[in-house]
Amino acid sequence: MDIVFDRAVDPGLIERSLAPAVFGSMWLDPAVVGPRPDYPSLPGAITCDLLVVGGGYTGLWTALHAAERDPGATIVLIEAERIGWAASGRNGGFVEASLTHGAANGKSRWPAEFDQLQRLGLDNLNGMQADIEKYGMNVDWQRTGMLNVATEAHQVPWLREAAAAGEGRFLDQGQVRSEVDSPTYLAGLFAAETCAIVDPARLVFELARACTEKGVRIHEHTDARAITTEAGGVAVTTAAATITAQRVVLATNVFPSLLRRNRLHTVPVYDHVLGTEPLTSEQLGRIGWWSRQGIGDSGNQFHYYRL
């Protein structure tokens, strides 16, 4: 194994490293995740109290909490592809409390509401953990904390200022290298309570399990094509049928909303993620990464890492 810290990396080294790579989500790889349940497509027209469109985190957690609040309600969730097919099954598995994509961004955009947003974000993280524990979800959840690192000298004061503002504990270069032995890390800011790591695909599958145990009906390969209001509620048209519901939750996230007025409210953002084969003890020792905390650098186009 070569460990390279040069900014001008030999392109041949990169090509050799990526030669055996396979495009796709490693979390959804059958060799990694093992067998997963199949949910039938919707065969015909139905009525329900609540229809959830989208089988990712937002849709599944919405359905689960709705079933908890009203056990007698008829709740249906539809997914155009498979549960977890989109962003929920293709991410780095970081679970951060921030609702504002970082404290600096939150303070600059919502200064009057920032403290409340911070509290809500931490409540959200704690609530996720509570649900995982309540339903016995096997999702490799670990409350590791988050280590932000400076890779340029001008970033070090940013981390000092963040520590002074109570956002975490400042680590000098020696302290950072005792956590992750990289000579490129000049300083760090460690926030112990605001981040967890998780197997994102298993979280989706376990949420679906919890939903079905609470009586939620899940239909995969059932795409919502149109939505209209009717006297009896809301009608959602799929390829095979029409679903009539008292209420509808649209949880399609990055994909264009069925409501035209909502389509400009979201912008798709893509990350490039690399997953390695499992590291050996010898490799872990050479890297010197002694805990499983999430790591992100302080650049504008930042990098993030986890074990």
Image (cartoon, grey):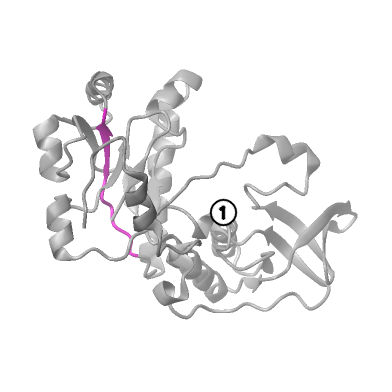
Position of 128 relative to 214 (above/below): above
- Residue sitting at 78 percent across and 78 percent down? 43
* Crowdedness near tag 1: few (<14), some (14–19) or many (≥20) residues, C-alpha within 10 Å: some
User: In the image, residue 296 lies at what x, y percent?
Assistant: 32, 39
Task: Give left or right: position of 226 versus 251.
Answer: right
Residue that mark 1 sits on: 58
Asked if residue 290 can be seen in this view, the reply is: no
User: In the image, residue 77 lies at what x, y percent?
Assistant: 66, 65
User: In the image, residue 164 lies at what x, y percent?
Assistant: 22, 21
User: In the image, residue 76 lies at what x, y percent?
Assistant: 68, 67
- Most foreground residue, 106 or 223: 223
Quadrant for the N terminus, please: bottom left
Q: Which residues are magenta?
A: 140-151
Position of 60 relative to 301 (above/below): below
- Residue sitting at 45 percent across and 26 percent down? 106
Position of 119 relative to 278 (above/below): above
Q: Is residue 132 magenta?
A: no
Quadrant for the C terminus, please: bottom left
Q: Quadrant of residue 68?
A: bottom right
Task: Give left or right: position of 277 versus 124.
Answer: left
